[in-house]
Amino acid sequence: MSGNRSGTLPFVGTVLPLPGQVPNGITLVSPDDGGLAASVVSRWPDGSASVVVLAGVSPFSANETRSLRLQAQAVPATTALGAARVAQLLASVAVEMGALGRAELIDFSRPERLWWANAHTICARYRLTLPGGARLEAVIDVQAFSSAHALVEVVIENGSMNSAAPAKPSGVAYNAQVLVNGNAIGSGDTAAAPEAQHAAFRAWYAAGWVGGDPGTRCTQAHADLQAHPLLFKCDRAGGDMAAYANDAYVPFGAGRQRGAGMGAGGDHPSIGPLPLWEARFLQTGDARAARAVEASALSVLGYNVNYRDSTTGLVPTFEQLAGRSMQSNWPVTYGPNDRMSWEVAHHPAAGLMAFVARPSPVYIEIAQKVAVWNGTWSTYGGTATGVFGRPYQGRGRAWCMRSLGHAILLTPGDLPWRAAALSSLTANVTYLDGWRNDAKARLNASWGETAAIAQDSAPNRPGFQEPLWFHHYLTTELHKLAAARLLGGTQQAALDTLADWCALQPVRWVNEQGNGAWRYVPYMYTLGRDAATIDSMADYGQQSAWAHSDAPAAASGTWMSFPDYKADTFAQYTANPTAGAYYPSYLWAALVAAVERRVPGAATAWAAVNANLVNLSSWRDGFASDPRWGAVPRSN
Amino acid sequence: MATLLSKPINLVVQPASTAAQGWGDGGATGSVAGDVWTPGRNAAGVVNAASWNALPLNRWVQVGGTRLDAMDAVVKAAIPGWNDPGVEKWNGVTDAWNGMAIDPAGSRMWLKGGGHSASGNNGIYRFDALKMAWAIEDLPSPTAPWSTAYIGSRNGGSFTFCAESDAAAKAKIALGTLQAINDVFYDELFWDGKPTSRHTYSSMVYVPETNELVMVCRRLWRYSLSERRWTYKRQIRDQAAQFMSGENMVAIYDEATREVLVSAAGSEGIYRATGYNLTSNQWTNWGSPWNIYSGIADVRVGRRVVIVQAPQRKVSYGGTTGIYWDYDLDTRSVKANGQCQLADGLTQNDFAPDNWFYDSAALTYIPSKNRFWLFTLMASGKMELIEIDPTTTPWTARRAPGLTGAVPSPGKNLERKMVYLPLLNAVLICDNAGKDLSLYRF
């Protein structure tokens, strides 16, 4: 809402109820706004609502912030808006592409799909084939309201393929304008694109309001959101989000994502359970951070992740893509890494928090597209499409699992994409169980390559070197997925078992090193004595003693770290005074997961960490400015 | 009947953060006629989205109603009797080798200029691109108290130098009592202590964390945009005998270290480069890799700074085809450096000869095209827009192709007044106080 905006305005927001919180047959109402209307977008396996869109139309005064309490109530008998409402507000959506020509949609009575509809809003999908001889199309989502407002979102894609016989679209150059009811709402010049043309699998976005932007942002209270199993409770409050106040989407721009070198080494704010700006939105609920979340999620459209099945008009499912990978028979490009190219081991979360910031089918499909890109990148080593196998690295598996979970949560149950993605999740649990069941895994830690193939990360150093922080990434994400209970029955039980097994690693790390060696968290840990067979010792105390020729300075002290391949002595480590994107913080997040999972010994380990870190409070203050790993156990 | 949830859920409906897209949603569309755009604005003075969207893409337009000299009436209304004794008056604010501080995220720019005999106007003027309008950030000093001697700077002197302040400083130097911080110096007005007008080149930067402007020209000056006053002044490296004057200052704000890095060139000032940490208020040691005589233009590109010394026809002082430095602020190292190759018929002889000592080019970067635009002086005596392609080795310079509409033809002292604004995806040029701004929307 701009400073001078007031009047009767629409608002729409997302709520992510916990499993069982809003059972089937129950909806959400508000004692503070009797007109509030809800639509369930997707459900948990028990039938309760997992994603709900709430909309209202209310009088607002300028700059007003309003809190609405929600309550449960049997679904009332109300009449939802229909496609006719869209047609009342929209006369045309046109794309003018210069010499290529013009395409226009004028019939809004027959949407391809209704994403949600209630008494205050309807969200309808349309598509428009564009001129130019390429397989360009405009994917149009309209959110029309009971007030005289409608939000029109247009994604211009060049990725339409028959999944059964896929062929890569050609690139095309143009300078286009998108018009709604004759008024320009945005433009895209492919000269700005990485290839100076609209290359296959890239897309751009334009949006505009009919009736004027109401300027309202409606979000679930961030403290409530932090209870969601796929998210986390933030340890420290955030500061001023002014840095995000001016974030804005630019076609083919990378926003805050890594425009070049997504796979490059070192930290980047996009890396983590959530990108930094999304974590800060979770931390604060600040509308400016929400703005950054949206702008940089939309920037993902500029990456090579956009494809659409020409028969269904939707993002293809893993079932449709069975047996396909980019290295052989799925013609989606990967690389080069110098230009807005996706990469599995460092890729950001995108879609979920943007949908929390503002519900839009664009964000559902961004999450789906990312998950499909990850699942079709490689089947090297004989894994199935949708399984994050041998070349993915441990961290890649963590992020791919996370992104898959986000997409599953958002995807409506009536879309075949969801069932296929759940199968992919199950297959990945089975794949990861290979480590749990392998005799080499004496210390509850996973390693790179495959469960059967252990590859030493530093062959020139004694023993078997492994970045345990990959395992910490995996632990935090598997915990979230298990806690979210996305699966059912034996599949969920297997996921729970796997998550518990992973979470025992940070617990054992602390409890088995009573001399304080747990405070020493290196870049590479000597997980075993043998480069080929790993050959871990029986516990972390023995293993760390084998790897170092001296002893830790004291049982109590600060977090310590070592940034190189292997420290031969504890004396080589240096203090890590502030939490952030660094190895002790990754371990911290994994330990928080273990505490939340209540695995055996977790409480003891948590107490030891709290009792023996002499600067714990000031160290944790680092999570205020960088909350990506700054979780704290929820008392649930 | 409604019941409580097992865990509470609350919705927060709040104003959306709309500052960036920032356009108004009013109905006034203004007009575009003859390559002059007259913006339509809402009641708050913000340009309406409908007006912005009516702009043609990839074409130069003039933005009607954006002459800086329109501020004359505003200043005179606020300060009765105010009269700039400079020979160029408002044009001296823009033209006397003056550049802007830029807030790309806020689509704002600040200009403080004057200097030489051109203008004694020491106000700060802000251009809000979302309003397409000038505003007075800080009024100029009243002229009524000024001495005859200072007013006489118009006769070949410089309004930068205030003899009364200089005398006060020298008296303190003689007594050994002159302080490096917040004391008197020749570059402030004796009557109110504000900085005199001066050639700012690229010496002024915007610091978002503290919402202030920092100017490193003659001395280091800090202006709080929150308090709307000059809050701090300090001798360069705390030594009265050494000042960042000369010519062609380039100030860079490194937000990662909270340092202002500044280089200067020209015929005076031995401290041609230094750093200053805004948090610790300590001078830091920084050396500029482009430590050359003069003639450079600068632009920030993310965490990089790109410096270009414009091509010059070789006569007697070593003219080049244009030297570039691509400087990484994170590593504090030059990632690319070389001499441009000229393409598409452009030759070194097309540029101003090196014995003109030209130091007023402007440089900006257009991310969507991955090209730099350099507006520089040619042998014809007019400025032309040169496009530099950084994707080749060495970088390639050519005349900017396909320019249509009201293509600007600035006077020669453009400096850091050609600005790409990311939220607008457009370039704005502020040439002369007597002209409307030029705009090119991509």
Image (cartoon, rainbow, N blue to C red):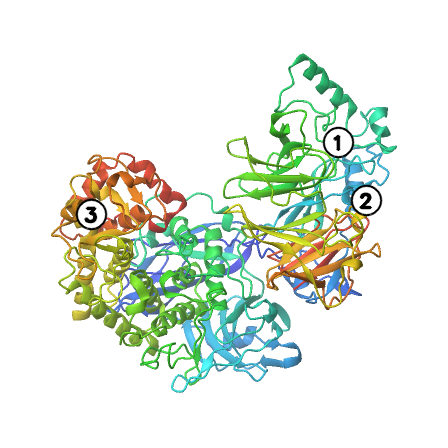
Q: Is residue A241 shown left or right of residue A481?
A: right
Q: Secondary structure at mark 1?
A: loop
| Label 1, label 3: how far apart the Cα atoms are | 71 Å
Q: Nearer the viewer, residue B223 or A555?
A: A555
Q: What residue type is disc 2 on?
A: Asn
1 vs 2, front mark:
2
- Which residue in the protein does label 3 denote? A547
Q: What residue type is disc 3 on?
A: Ala
Q: Give me the chain letter of mark 2.
A: B
Q: Is residue B112 shown left or right of residue B83?
A: left
Q: Give me the chain letter of mark 1.
A: B
Position of the C terminus of chain B, as image quadrant, is bottom right
Contact (CB < 8 A) between labels 3 and 2? no
- Horizontal and vertical percent position of residue B356: 81, 47
Q: Residue at x 77, y 29 (%)?
A: B161
Q: Nearer the viewer, residue A372 or B352?
A: B352
- Horizontal and vertical percent position of residue B403: 74, 66
